[in-house]
Image (cartoon, grey):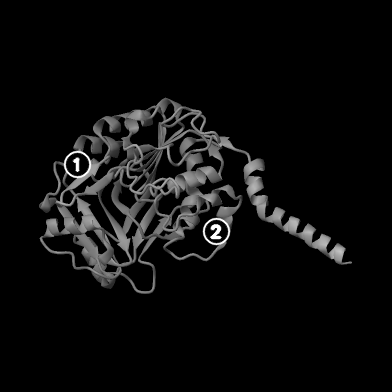
Amino acid sequence: MPRARTLLKGVLGIVLILVLISPVLYQAFVKPSRSLNIAVLDKTVTVFDAQARTYPEHYSIFWILNHEKIYPTRMGLRAPDRNSNGRYDIDYDYFGYHPPTDKLSGVLDIDLGSIDLLYLADSFGLLEYFPNGTVRRRAGGISLEEAKVIEGYARSGGSIIAEWNTLGYPTYLDREALAVLESVFHIRSYGYGKHYSDLADVEKFYKEMYQDVTGQAWRFTGEGIMIILEFVVESYPRREKTEFIILESTDLQVGTFPMFLNVNNNHPALAGADSAIPYGYWFEITTPRSDAEVLGRYEIKTTSSGSEKLARHGLKPTMTAIIAYEGSYRLIYYAGDFADYAPNYPHFFLSYVAGAGHAMRALPMSAWNGFFWRFYYPTFMKTLRWVMRSGI
């Protein structure tokens, strides 16, 4: 009898191990892979750690591609056989700034004839602060030459997903480049903002910018939203053409998250998405053209004082968040930092576990960390299918 009990425990142990590793085995050996060539532009690689694989602006894109077993056939900074496993390599398979080698690549380095989709994730670039107080920008912005290449790709029937701040600073300093890109994306951009749980935590760059523009030191604390309207294109800063709107806690409603993303989940690109998702990260102030379709809007939960502050600058608490264009090419433009909005990035190992996304969405989440699991990831593949007219 003791021997039988020991044998039973051993069998149960083996069964338990198989149950635990079955999602990994299924993901690795059963789930079919698909081929898709995506060129991701990320000029804002501010954090580099090859061990931790932390690339805030494109981490979540590569996590989903790996989890969905979407692999490239040819594309990237290296030869087609650069990866032994054939997957998208988060360290190499993007165009932008590469800290280990200090190498910079961009749109002009992409073989646009060999890609299925162009994903413009971030082009803000890097700010380097020196002991003497000077600041140098590196890698940022879309040049006029790059803008024209993007336009040519679009007009030839290319598929594009783009995010803030493709049109923002420093790209908008080049009036010609901005005009080309606004024509491609069918919107006009003239500002941006961000929600903060404490306005005291606003980035140093913006505190200095606020003082330069207003002549006053940054004094704000507590929950709030910072909005910056940009009108200058020739030089920066130009005090008379840059405006700050600071929504403090008294300008926001109590008892609710201060900002939501409301989406049209009847559109194929967003089918089945939650219709209202708390949003608390970078967002863009845009005006869509009449031929663009608005798929999502931001709603800031303002009090009367908050609405009055916005109205004084010609704004309303509801703003365009997602637009789609369908013509000779298809485009989705996120007027926000959507790919980067994953405060608690899922460990990359989870991308090798089948069903991880479904399991995570079933867990209780705060408004702060639910955006990736409740919106971005669930709609990613649907957005790809729509923008590419493909059943992948």
Pick whichever, 32 or 154, lies toward us. Answer: 32
Residue lying furthest front in this view?
3
Q: Which residue is mark 1?
A: 173
On the question of residue 268 being in view, the answer is no
Q: Amino acid at mark 1?
A: Leu
On the question of residue 154 being in view, the answer is yes
User: Of circles 1 and 2, which is in front?
Assistant: 2
Nearer-N-terminus badge (1/2) = 1
**Residue located at (55% from left, 58% from top):** 360
At which x and y percent is residue 242?
Answer: 16, 53
Mark 1 to mark 2: distance in Å?
A: 41 Å
At which x and y percent is residue 166?
Answer: 31, 42
Residue lying furthest top in this view?
113
**Residue located at (30% from left, 67% from top):** 198
At which x and y percent is residue 134?
Answer: 15, 49
**Residue located at (49% from left, 56% from top):** 373
**Badge 1: how crowded within 10 Å, few (<14), some, or many (20+)?**
many
Element marked by disc 2: helix
Q: Is residue 259 left or right of residue 379?
A: left
Q: Which disc is residue 276 wearing?
A: none
Q: Amino acid at mark 2?
A: Met
Tag 1 near tag 2, CB within 8 Å: no
Element marked by disc 1: helix
Pick whichever, 342 or 275, lies toward us. Answer: 342
Pick whichever, 325 or 210, lies toward us. Answer: 210
Q: Where on the picture, by quarter, is residue 362?
A: bottom right
At which x and y percent is residue 179?
Answer: 24, 37
Q: Which disc is residue 360 wearing?
A: 2
